Amino acid sequence: MTDNVVIDVYGMTKRFGDQTAVNGIDLQVRQGEVYGFLGPNGSGKTTFIRMLCGLLAADAGEGTCLGFDVIGESESIKRQVGYMTQRFSFYEDLSIAENLDFVARMYDVDNRREAVQESIERLGLAKRQKQLAGELSGGWKQRLALAACLIHKPRLLLLDEPTAGVDPKARRDFWEQIHELAGQGLTFLITTHYMDEAERCDRLAYLSYGNLLTHGTAAEVITGAKLTTWSISGPDLQEVAKQLRSKPGVGQAVAFGTMLHVSGSNSQVLEQAIYPFRTEPYVWQQINPGLEDVFIHLMGSSKDNFSI
């Protein structure tokens, strides 16, 4: 592992019975990087994160996390990782300060009271520190969870859909905190379903049914998909979309607000498919595909690894 690489793993694999939840994934994340982990539900994102922090034993693979062997030294990794789960997992009948004190005790943090107060101040929780966790809104619960992740001064934060269920302002504030912490050298691996959050990441990886389909910066991911995309405006777009989806070369026809996005991986075949539809009163315009266009395309082209 080079000095600035925090996660450096190869062939990470996890099976549950006959099903492969994570299939031979390679991943490298640098110090201070905000790395986005995307994919549909059941794609293996949470399983991969749990393997990294030692909560699940990998069935195959090798590499390091924070300089420790990801298979044989999971206990050492746990001490230097903060893990924020999808669901709020703190005691709702304890106050913010009491919850943080409990977490500090679990990690045997030195100067516990000072560490708790520092965490409270760092995340702007001072005025609410005596409030019961069960009375907090989604955004404040999120701040408490992040404060708890930071209390033992980890070098890596693994955040599993941390902004699910919170309002747009709370999400924006949360991401400002993430980038501030990353600027101080903390490294993040974050799973998300939000495309605006994906665009805030330094680099991205996209999983589907346990397989890594693409990775890189947002621009690299979009370029690598080699999609041609058109936007359409006009009446009865749902009916237009239904007809287009049956045409060769049309990979997707998806509503985006009052517009329809039509994409395909072969520009010439797509052009032939849409030609009969390019009539008044419809307005067609070729556009640059966005991350959402790419991820819908990747979802449609991937194969479910779970039998029904």
Image: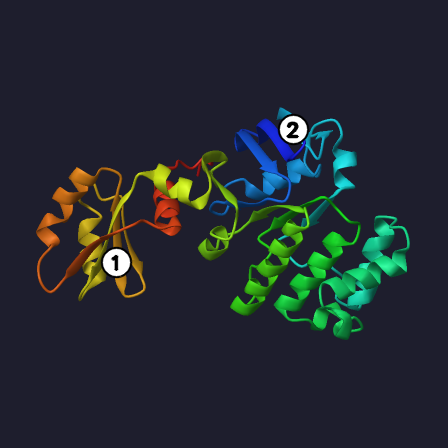
Q: Is 95 above or below relative to 24? A: below
Residue 103 visible (yes or no): yes
Secondary element under disc 1, as helix, strand or loop, is: strand
Q: Residue at x 76, y 30 (%)?
A: 73
On screen, residue 3 versus residue 230, left or right, reads right
Q: Position of residue 13 (x, y in %)?
A: 58, 29
> In the image, which disc is placed on residue 2?
2
- How far apart marks 2 and 1 lie (CA) works out to 46 Å
Secondary element under disc 2, as helix, strand or loop, is: loop
Q: Residue at x 73, y 58 (%)?
A: 147
Name the foreground residue: 198 vs 276. Answer: 198
Q: Position of residue 193 (x, y in %)?
A: 49, 52
Q: Picture quarter containing residue 264?
A: top left
Choose the circle earlier in sequence order: 2 or 1: 2
Quadrant of the image containing the N terminus: top right
Q: Is 256 above or below relative to 246? A: below
Quadrant of the image containing the C terminus: top left
**Nearest-to-viewer mark from 2 and 1:** 2
Which residue matches tag 1?
260
Q: Amino acid at mark 1?
A: Leu
Q: Residue at x 50, y 35 (%)?
A: 210
